[in-house]
């Protein structure tokens, strides 16, 4: 344990008045909120790809980080060192979970078969580390977007050989996730979309994607993997259009292909805003459908049009998110994965601590505020009152499908204009601010 | 017939070399393309609200147009004069269809009941004019967004009285559409959405909206109306979020509430771009689902974030649209409605002619180009070739659901990397340009 | 005084723990912060157009508000009643300032001359009310965008007659502002831009706009008006492109036409975001140029592409704004004008109180937080340290213009790579959150 | 000459009816348009970075292209092979110019000094190739954004050592450009901006950037380099905010620091749209200021928020661009540089030909159409007529600064409302379509 020398032992809770940048001000793991400890509710996870494999490269520049765990003499040695760094970091932060893509933890080999072997090798090491530390796998996934073969998609590829290779890769990634006791398995198909309709057979691609997911469902059953399947919507980038555009689109697809019982959604804040939605909107749509399974807790820059994957520090976002999560009774097997990267100029390893501590405090504080708002019932009472006319017999009959236009027409023509009431948006926004 | 004195008789086809701004250069109604006349394929419609009722007002200014048909002494007289203007304009343009909202053709009365009576009165006049001129109704709809009662939605209102009034209004609008032989009935719920989640019960609103549409389906059956029901997606404006966000979202909703057999989509170009999609994308998604029913042929300004509803003059948009439409065998009972308004500074009535002529020529030319591309098969052959590996036995078994990850894994590990081929986007874009 | 019966006397400060929605939790007018009372620093103003003249109309619907001050029997009587409402509202809120357009306070007449007369009439009434109440005019302006004559601009009109009329109108508005002791005069040229370059002579329009502003400067001198001239940038809406696009563009224009000594900027939050900038960015650019004169304190919806003009309730925005304002020593003669409107569904007059109270509390709290951050110097010390290499002799010589590429080249080739340090963005964001 | 075996000799003009994808349909180098050959007007250039050094990598995937000129055994050998590929490609295309960054043509060494030596080495080779082939350098530039040292800017770095290194690098790049007879030198400062204002001293950065450019001006004079200096605006990416945001912002900066006589602008289509402007707008603003020096002819995807750098195939864009360019009498020493990359899936070297041929044809056709519109005077006559009231004595006196508000007020009050006329946007858009 010596990759992160700036933190000797573990980051501890010191409370809101602390000026120590390497302490928690709000995240108090054992503090009970709404019957559960913060640790139980806020199932934080570290994202392997950004935190350890991120280099600081962007489209206009090479990597800027100089990580000690990268200084091995072979890809597999680097993989082992990186694994050590992960468990050290999670332990020092007091975070119980991590998430990975197959190619994050194990290097690509010269052939696909060798890549599979590399994965097996590293998974065995990870299993050992998990047992030693108690750190667990929130979810695993297959990286089906970096390799050139996936340039035009994996499960939606026009090329059957690519589709088959993706299927094989996902099988191995599911095996790895199962072996490591992963509590979920995520599908983010960054290239499952199109770049131009001029060369695209839309129907074929959607059909083959459904077959792809159905085979995953079948394979899950076969191997007895009990984790939750999650689909992560994103509208675009790297493709022009990704089929898993947003919550509504994914839900539509799952319904059409009769896959809806097997998947939930993993909502990412930055993907929501890229789709022109608020984070809150996407969470609400997913939750309303009973499909909010997990969260990629990051933040985008709404003035920029790409996935900036910043650490979440906005308190409003955290409050709105936690209200939805707490109202649906938590995230179940899901959690809050920090799919976020420190800025390219944040070159010190201690920046990784600042980033995670800030994010964890933001959501911990968001939880406290959200729960208080819920407990006080201020917003809920307002909503109940606003819709109270629907509690009438007539309202019930409409929703039950036993009313008709004729019936309503007769009633309307015999009565006057309905009385209107204010929507009170400003009042409600003020209410929220009194809790912050 | 004397509202549009700048055109004496009718606008005629003079061919591409004509310099006459009041003649068609490409729209040649009787010219046969792919077995149908242009008139049969390009079922153009004039939008009553923009063309006659538009005043040139915007959020920062009052009306700028001075229309002769507005100079009546009472609302009903103005309605009758406007009706005359409509039929004169359609006849002079050689357009066979118009579209309306109930409140476009007939004025709001002091009470809801009086509004209904006004509608009955004007519909009788319209019926007479239709019979005299042969001009037909492409679709009718109810305006459920202008009146203050609909500030928080109609079919999704938190207020049962508002919901009931909207139901009654839609009943009357369906009656009117049926009476006038409307070939479709459109639902655009501009305020069926939310402004803030702080005061919104999402589930209640979606449920009541489904009940609303189901009652419409029931009523359609009851009165024997045979037109097609159409839903028009739009992501926002006037609301922050409209439930009918885009094609995928509407399709999801229709599936969830088992309404999908009763509705098709009316795709508007400007609504597509507001949702972050190309016009072509929305058409392709709808068509792929077998649900592309009609088109609101306009154009937005992609640098601006609101519905500019400009007349469509971009040839590329028209070519891509007509490729999709022709490949699905036309729009059936639907058509191309110019849901577009002349700019606020385009204050002359002759500007209405320029606007429609330009739009009609653009789509006529788009049809000619699209059909030529289809007939030559250049793009289709490329696509067929690109996906040809899926024609194999393995490809078929995957799509038939009789393959498994294990099977594919075994095959992949025993064979090498799949051979990749270029996506050829630049080549294909050049192909399209050779047709323009 | 009986338009706003929901507030009997005045809204008072009750502190952060108050649950009274009609009390201030943070705005404590006499509380001293950084040597000035909150009242002196936070020169709040009520926007006449939104608060009293706003009807709730939008592009898809008519007005929804039913205001008692609108129930007069003539336009001039309504104007007088509205004036009373204004002074009652400001007094009850404890706000010292209001802002208006000429056509807000006085109605358009049948002719331009009559409009001028109406203005004179109402200004006399307003002067009396100001004297009675002590409420003052933060700024006045001319409405050069509602009347049809301004459809293609005022100071940039292609039509000389329109330009002349705008000149005359602005003269009268300046007279009115001077008569009422207005502390500033604002230019927002909503239609000073273009809708299409196809009909636009860009050079002519920019030249005539400069002449327009120069004549205003001359006239100001002539009448001895001592208020500050302010230009309010906005990128678009209602025009496709407004010449006063953003701070940088306005500054460029003022420099080019040698007007820069006569104008400062009035920065609006929602206009900033429409231009693709943060509110903070626009404030920083203006302040850095020594030109930040006043603020239109509202907020947009960054997911929507039009001017939503919502009341500012986001604490982060307020903190960042107040840091810039406090660092430049306040806004001088400027202030914080709530150019914001309650939502269309917020139909009660009490909603106007909620909206203003929430906004005033947000900026008061923003002031407290910002000043604490400044006083603690945490961010400033970090910045000073980051740039400290520039304090060297070499740094000074570069900035003084006495260094050359040759000199630097020689030095670089003889020394090694510069040592880099982290940008520490995550750390700094956490610092801000510890103050909120 | 054997890197591009798919084209044996050179791409030739075959005319609009040709179906040969590897022939020009519109670009006819010796054809005279408006007194100049197409070759003289359309000074096309190939962008070294995208065409030869582009790998197909994006933020979510590694390179996909397998280029024969990359298969050397050392960086310098690869550099020499790539140089050969460049001259072969330009010759086969019949393009007279190329553009480069210093680090495109010569590899980074282990030290900065070695990088300088590498550059010298390759420049000597390039000079020889230029002499042999007649292919010329349109512009050179220094890459001040890839190396980690430039993570926080070069000329705006907070780190004096980085600033000095950038100065040295630019000196060498200017030397190289001068040695190769480059006709321009471009400044694109991709990281000259900020990522967060929390760690930024805005004034210091702008001041040091001005010093940086002033030293470049001085050095240019010292070495007698006669090429044109060009600044290329871009609003963001990779930084959150780039100081050279758009044309107006750059012009403002150049005016403020008295640098305006020494620079013109290099306008890129995709940068325009990222800034929320049309390509045409940015060209018009630059041209209106007499500062349109060169063009990066590419295209963005307006539905996506990052720099897609696609090849320009949209005819409308080309027509509007060429109208502005022809009206200002061409681009002088500038040209049309294809700062565009083939898509990641366009993996064949022949795709590079398709891409350039399509782009060259698009602009050639754009030139023909634009010149015809100009020659016919249709749009110009309309504009002249629209502004004709300004030709009066009064109009002249206003623009000459000899008029006053009082004078105009007197005149307005004694005359009636000005007569308005239609803006005719739809008519004008139709006019353009008749030429396409």
Image (cartoon, coloured by chain):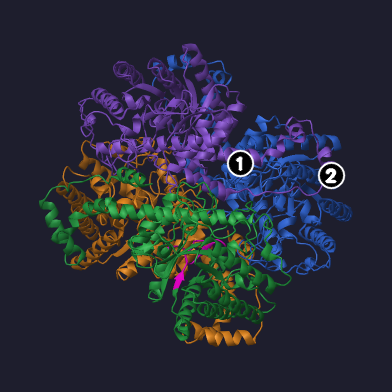
Chain colours: A blue, B purple, C orange, D green
Figure quadrant of the N terminus of chain C: top left
D375 displayed left or right of A374: left
Asked whether residue A225 appears in the rendered view, the answer is no
In the image, A159 versus C265, the foreground residue is A159
The answer to whether tags 1 and 2 share a subunit is no
Residue in the foreground of this view, choosing between C217 and B125: B125
Residue C48 on the magenta segment: no
Residue C150, given in percent of the width and then of the height, sits at: 26, 49
Instruction: In the rendered view, tell whether residue B323 sits above or below residue D345.
Output: above
Query: Is the residue D380 above or below the residue A419 in the image?
Result: below
- Of all chains, the one bearing label 2 is A
Q: Which residue is mark 2?
A: A175
Instruction: Say which chain tag 1 marks.
Output: B
- Residue D237 lies within the magenta run: yes
Q: Which circle, 1 or 2, is nearer the viewer? A: 1
Q: Quadrant of the C terminus of chain C?
A: bottom right
Where is residue D357? Give x, y as percent.
Answer: 52, 55
Q: Residues within 10 Å of mark 2 (few under 14, many from 20)?
A: many
Relative side of B38 to C219, left or right:
right
Q: Main secondary structure of the magenta part?
A: loop
Counting from the top left corner in percent of width and height, residue A180 is at 85, 48
Which residue in the protein does label 1 denote? B382
Q: What SS does tag 1 mark?
A: helix
Q: Is residue A78 visible?
A: yes
Quadrant housing residue C206? bottom left
Q: Secondary structure at mark 2?
A: helix
Q: Is residue D234 above or below residue C385?
A: above
Q: Position of residue B222 (x, y in %)?
A: 49, 12
Foreground: C392 or A34? C392
Query: How far apart are the two marked residues, 1 and 2, measured between alpha carbons?
Result: 38 Å
The magenta segment is D229-246
């Amino acid at each position: 344990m010596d990759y992160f020398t700036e933190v000797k032992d573990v980051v501890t809770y010191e409370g809101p008045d602390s000026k120590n940048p390497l302490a928690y001000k709000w995240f108090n793991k054992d503090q009970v909120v709404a019957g559960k400890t913060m640790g139980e509710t806020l199932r934080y996870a570290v994202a392997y790809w950004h935190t350890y494999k991120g280099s600081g490269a962007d489209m206009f520049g090479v990597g800027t980080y100089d990580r000690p765990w990268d200084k091995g003499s072979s890809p597999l040695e680097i993989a082992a060192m990186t694994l050590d760094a992960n468990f050290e970091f999670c332990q020092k932060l007091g975070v119980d979970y991590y998430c990975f893509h197959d190619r994050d933890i194990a290097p690509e080999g010269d052939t696909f078969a060798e890549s599979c072997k590399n994965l097996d090798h590293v998974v065995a090491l990870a299993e050992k580390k998990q047992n030693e530390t108690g750190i667990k796998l929130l979810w695993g996934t297959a990286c089906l977007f970096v390799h050139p073969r996936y340039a035009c998609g994996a499960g939606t590829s026009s090329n059957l050989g690519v589709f088959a290779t993706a299927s094989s890769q996902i099988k191995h990634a599911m095996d790895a996730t199962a072996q490591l006791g992963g509590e979920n398995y995520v599908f983010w198909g960054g290239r499952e979309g199109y770049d131009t309709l001029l060369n695209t057979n839309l129907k074929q691609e959607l059909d083959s994607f459904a077959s792809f997911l159905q085979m995953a469902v079948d394979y899950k059953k076969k191997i007895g993997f009990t984790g939750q399947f999650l689909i992560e919507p994103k509208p675009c980038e790297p493709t022009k259009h990704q089929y898993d555009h947003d919550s509504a689109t994914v839900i539509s697809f799952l319904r059409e292909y009769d896959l809806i019982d097997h998947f939930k959604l993993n909502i990412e804040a930055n993907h929501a805003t890229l789709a022109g939605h608020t984070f809150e909107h996407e969470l609400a749509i997913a939750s309303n459908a009973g499909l909010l399974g997990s969260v990629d807790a990051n933040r985008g820059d709404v003035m920029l049009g790409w996935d900036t994957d910043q650490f979440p520090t906005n308190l409003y976002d955290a409050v709105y998110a936690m209200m939805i999560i707490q109202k649906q009774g938590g995230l179940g097997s899901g959690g809050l994965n920090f799919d976020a990267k420190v800025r390219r100029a944040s070159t010190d390893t201690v920046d990784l601590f600042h980033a995670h501590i800030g994010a964890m405090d933001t959501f911990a504080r968001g939880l406290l505020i959200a729960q208080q708002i819920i407990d006080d019932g201020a917003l809920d009472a307002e909503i109940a009152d606003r819709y109270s006319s629907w509690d009438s017999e007539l309202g019930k009959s409409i929703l039950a499908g036993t009313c008709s236009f004729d019936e309503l027409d007769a009633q309307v023509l015999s009565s006057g204009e309905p009385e209107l009431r204010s929507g009170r948006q400003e009042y409600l926004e003020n209410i929220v601010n009194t809790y912050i």
